[in-house]
Amino acid sequence: MKKTNIYVLGLFLAAKFIPMSAIAQGDPVPYALSIRADDLKKHLTFIASDSLKGRNTGSPEQKVAANYIADSFKKSGIAPVNGSYFQKVDLVNRAWSNVFISSKGKKYEYLGEMMANALAPVAANSKFPVVFAGFGVQQGGYTDFDKLNAKGKYVLAFEGEAKDAAGLYVLSGSKDPSVFGKGDGWKEKLKRAQAAGAKGLILIADRDTKAFGNQVRQRQVMMKRFGNERMAFADAASAANEAPVLLISSEAAAEILGTTEAELLAYKASLGTAKKSVASKFKAAPIEVTIERTEKPVDTYNVVGYLEGTDKKEELVVLTAHYDHIGVSADGQINNGANDDGSGTVTVMELAEAFGKAAAEGKRPRRSILFMMVTGEEKGLLGSEWYANHPLFPLKNTVVDLNTDMTGRYDDEHKGKPDYIYEIGSDKLSSQLREVLVEQNKKHVGLELDFRFNDPNDPNRFYYRSDHYNFAKHGIPVAFFFNGVHDDYHMPGDEVDKIEFDQIQKVGRLVFYMAWEIANREQRLVVDSNKP
């Protein structure tokens, strides 16, 4: 055998035993280093400029941002999906235009004399009888719906649940409320009321009239700032169990019940003393209800770019951020959202450029990568939910979502102590994802990884408040990168001149190294955890 043939055979045999991942990967460092603070700043200076007016979902200015992102994907060599960089998200804007109840000739206006936990359309001046149900509880000694004829009527009940003389909740016997006394306890009461045939629920606020008035005024301020409109999916049919849940003061309730506020509150106290339901002498007057809703379509899109992989191209790594923000306040102030989530938006743009550069130099990843800027996050994670319900690629083939939302500022605890990031979710579905995070951070970046908000008892519930969660709901491992809340959160002060671009650069590089590893490893991430 000739010497040259032996040499070629040796190369062939050596290659046979070199893992495909090693061939596909190469060295990620040069591409990670292409994610630079000055490029991030260049993009963010446009994305968070006054000219884009805060990128409110469905606004013309948000569409300008979408085109800018798509153009960046194209320049980076990132392909469209099915011929387009845009996935239409079919939303409508709904607003409550005329909401009130009236009784005995007196009118109680929405955000005037009442508030709402839930609204549902009711034809103008619809008439309903009202029945009083104490606390509206059906548990233990409280049998408020026994023998209560609520069919076709509105149920009037106290908010919360009974406490004894020591201030303990009667149902639990402790300082901890039952399901009826928690923040969403009204949902439990509504279930009982609807099971009895009720058409709606009116709750008597668990605070005095002055405190209730203050709460209404706070809601008025919020409404003035953020408006009355709410977005929803156009194809979402009204829930069969949709019903209004209104909140009124004890003074207003006493008027409807034909008694005094003092007598009503005395009766409420007696329910705590008796530790059971007690018949009342009150007779509720009928009410008229008007709840009118307007609806108009919203023109908005997720922006998507696709880099096809090599031998494992059917599997998908997803990199997300949201490019919408809250727009212009009613008082005319622009909320530019430089950190929320301009920082994540420009990070994903730079990630696309880095992977595009690697692919152009022959280092295409084994798994495919979807770069996605979602819309409607500020309206309730709507863009990512739409994608999860209308995926461009099968969810069963989606390996991971790495989500970046607010990484360009420091919270109060880390002022003067940069080089940190909060990470949420990486251990909840896959034991391997957290390992990848820690390994790549230790090897390449060296940030302090703070997992405190990963605690299922975290009152902020950040895990449920950004777009990764709509992937996690489908059993897809996720990691969420976040710098914490600052004083300018959802305020006009969230501006480019306050952004720490070196911080975004470090987080962006960490996400790149993680994505590179996950996209090129031999086995996809296992899904072997089910943590809350």
Image (cartoon, helix red, strand yellow):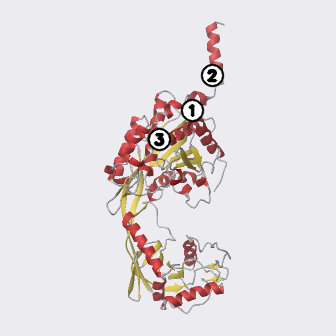
Q: Position of residue 58 (x, y in %)?
A: 37, 55
Which mark is first along the chain, 2 or 3? 2
- Count of picture labels: 3
> Disc 3 vs disc 2: which is toward the camera?
3
Q: Position of residue 44 (x, y in %)?
A: 39, 44
- Circle 2: is it few (<14), some (14-19), or many (20+) Cα within 10 Å? few
Q: CA distance from mark 3 to mark 2?
A: 40 Å
Kindly identify the residue that appears in the image at 49 percent across and 31 percent down. 358
Give the amino acid type for the residue marked by disc 3 in the picture.
Asp
* Residue at the spot of label 2: 15
Please identify the residue farthest to the top as the structure is shown. Answer: 2
Q: Secondary structure at mark 3?
A: helix
Using the image as rendered, state which of residue 400 and residue 413 is in the foreground.
413
Please identify the residue farthest to the bottom as the structure is shown. Answer: 281
* Residue at the spot of label 1: 311
> Disc 3 vs disc 1: which is toward the camera?
3
